[in-house]
Image (cartoon, rainbow, N blue to C red):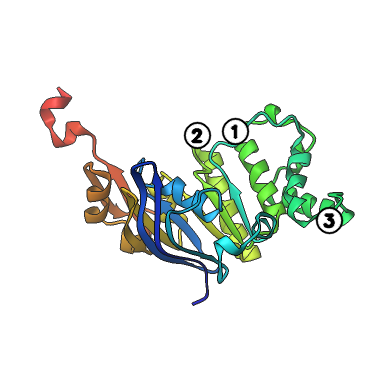
Amino acid sequence: MQTVVDIEGLRHFYGPFQALRDLSFSVPKGCFFIVIGPNGSGKTTLLKTLAGIEAPASGQVNILGRPLKEYTRKGLAKRLAFVPQLPSEDFPFRAREIVLMGRSPHLGVLGLDRETDRDIARQAMEFTGISPFAERRLDQLSGGERQRVFIARAICQEPEILLLDEPTAALDLAHQVRIMDLMERLKKDRGTTVVMVSHDVNLAAMYADRLLVMGKGKMVSIGTPDQVLTYEILEKTYGCPLLVDESPLGGVPRVTLVPSRYTDPGRGR
């Protein structure tokens, strides 16, 4: 099995606080890989480390078989794209212009875009369904539309690996499904490896090829959704009562939170 991300013994500190603790795992090529876990478990720190934004204290990170530290910023941007959580609304640009910015790692010395670059940007906008509002400014778009603009910009980089930090956060149900379906299409149609952080365990169960569960900076479990999303693993990791059964859609686990009034009837009176 070919891998595109290989991590061994990864550690990261914020002052005395250890955010990542001896993480070791690999991400297969063409995989939809989702990282879940409670707040403060190190998910975003992990993603920023893979993107070269944060420098680890120790450990090895290989991207496409090459140590991350050997890449130049431009060289890494040709192979890997990062979409942060809640991208800024302050860009005074139109959607089309923001998407075209994704071509910057591929431009020559003068930084001038070519017709080829504009064609790739148009294809990225068509792929993400944002062509109808290509001429609108970012502050004129809804949260789901803005998220798709920044995903289109990342696709415009033509990366082999796409990193996303909670791309469905604060979106309504319809936009959540659109974003997840878009990632699945990107994986199937273009062979892109998608690494995503998510707080939605049930969305992760339905879409992930492999799941990494993190807790307190450590790897709690890794595997397919049915291997990882078990009562024993999740209740211990999240520290709250829950139920795990099979989704009505079949074939994937479904996780249901249990309100306190069901575990302590006296509190519901």
| Residue type, label 3 | Gly
Q: Residues within 10 Å of mark 1 (few under 14, many from 20)?
A: many
| Residue under the image location 31 percent in, 48 percent down | 216
Kindly state the secondary structure of the residue where label 3 is placed.
loop
Residue 169 appears anywhere in the view:
yes
The amino acid type found where label 1 is placed reads Gly
Confirm whether residue 180 shows in the render. Answer: no
What distance separates the C-alpha of mark 1 from that of mark 3? 33 Å
Frontmost of labels 1 and 3 is: 3
Q: Which mark is residue 170?
A: 2
The residues bearing labels 2 and 3 have C-alpha atoms spaced at a distance of 38 Å
Q: Which residue is mark 3?
A: 108
Q: Quadrant of residue 160?
A: bottom right
CA neighbours of label 3 inside 10 A, class few (<14), some (14 to 19), many (20+):
few
Horizontally, residue 98 falls left or right of residue 186, namely right
Q: CA distance from mark 1 to mark 2?
A: 8 Å
The first of marks 2 and 3 along the sequence is 3
Q: Secondary structure at mark 1?
A: helix
Q: Is label 2 or label 3 in front? A: 3
- Mark 2 closeness class: few <14, some 14–19, many ≥20 residues within 10 Å: few
Task: Identify the residue shown where x is 45% and y is 55%.
Answer: 34
Which one is in front, 200 or 12? 12
State the image coordinates of residue 182 (x, y, percent, origin top left).
60, 52
The x, y position of residue 249, in whole percent, is 40, 55
Quadrant for the C terminus in the image: top left
* Mark positioned earlier in the residue sequence (1 or 3): 3
Give the residue at x 55% y 58%: 194
Depth check: give the residue in front, 129 or 147. Answer: 147
Q: Earlier in the sequence, mark 1 or mark 2?
A: 1
Label 1 sits on residue: 143
Among the 4 quarters of the image, the one containing residue 251 = bottom left
Of residues 56 and 42, the one nearer the viewer is 56
